[in-house]
């Protein structure tokens, strides 16, 4: 009887750990930053993460999923979209798309009204095997 109880507890514990791992790995995360820098591969990198929004700062929001950045947006003090300082054509939000191999293939830029203002396509630098 005790072995059955221990076995049930071990299975329940394993399922909880598995659930935690799956939700951590396969859920989108949002982080807020005071500033953003673009890397050479055209993906943004947040600078000075903001742990808690207090409504007194402008900020950048970066959403990522599975270790890949899926969107960047700039926000005013109250959370409304504002134009990204270094973007052309008054883009306020940029969404990134990847191919099945994880290479960046497209960046879609939106204005403050969430209408598409520009689409940039990339050719992935796939290494020959």
Image: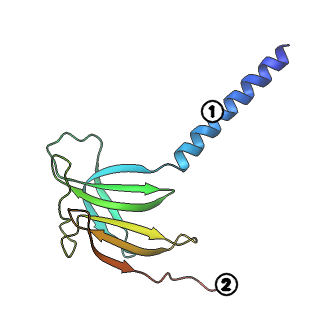
Residue 16 is tagged as: 1
Q: Earlier in the sequence, mark 1 or mark 2?
A: 1
| In contact (CB < 8 Å): disc 1 and disc 2 | no
- Tell me which residue sits at (32%, 58%) in the image: 46
Q: Position of residue 35 (x, y in %)?
A: 23, 58
Query: How many numbered discs?
Result: 2
Q: Disc 1 vs disc 2: which is toward the camera?
A: 1
Q: Is residue 18 left or right of residue 111?
A: right
Residue 121 pos. (x, y %):
40, 80
Label 1, label 2: how far apart the Cα atoms are: 40 Å
Question: Which residue is rendered at x = 69% and y = 33% of the image?
Answer: 14
- Name the residue that disc number 2 marks: 129
Q: Is residue 56 above or below residue 34?
A: above
**Residue 103 locus on image (x, y percent):** 51, 73
**Is the C terminus in the top left, top right, bottom left or bottom right quadrant?**
bottom right
- The circle on residue 116 is none
Helix, strand or loop at mark 1: helix
Q: Is residue 18 left or right of residue 59?
A: right
Quadrant where the N terminus sits is top right
- The answer to which image quadrant residue 94 occupies is bottom left
99 up-or-down from 53: above or below: below
**Drawn side of residue 72 relative to residue 23, left or right:** left
Label 2 residue SS:
loop
105 is higher (above) or lower (below) than 25: below
Q: Residues within 10 Å of mark 1 (few under 14, many from 20)?
A: few
Q: Is residue 79 left or right of residue 122?
A: left
Q: Residue at x 21, y 76 (%)?
A: 88
The residue positioned 30% from the left and 42% from the top of the image is 51
């Amino acid at each position: 009887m005790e072995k059955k109880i221990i076995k049930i507890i071990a299975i329940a514990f394993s399922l909880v750990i598995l659930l935690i791992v799956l939700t951590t790995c396969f859920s989108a995360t949002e982080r807020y930053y005071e500033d953003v820098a673009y890397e050479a591969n055209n993906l943004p990198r947040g600078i000075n993460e903001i742990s808690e929004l207090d409504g007194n700062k402008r900020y950048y929001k970066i959403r990522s999923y599975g270790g890949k950045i899926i969107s960047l947006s700039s926000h005013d003090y109250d959370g409304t979209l504002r134009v990204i300082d270094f973007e052309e054509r008054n883009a306020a939000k940029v969404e990134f798309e990847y191919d099945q191999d994880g290479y960046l293939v497209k960046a879609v830029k939106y204005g403050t009204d969430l209408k598409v203002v520009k689409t940039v396509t990339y050719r992935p630098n796939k290494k020959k095997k």
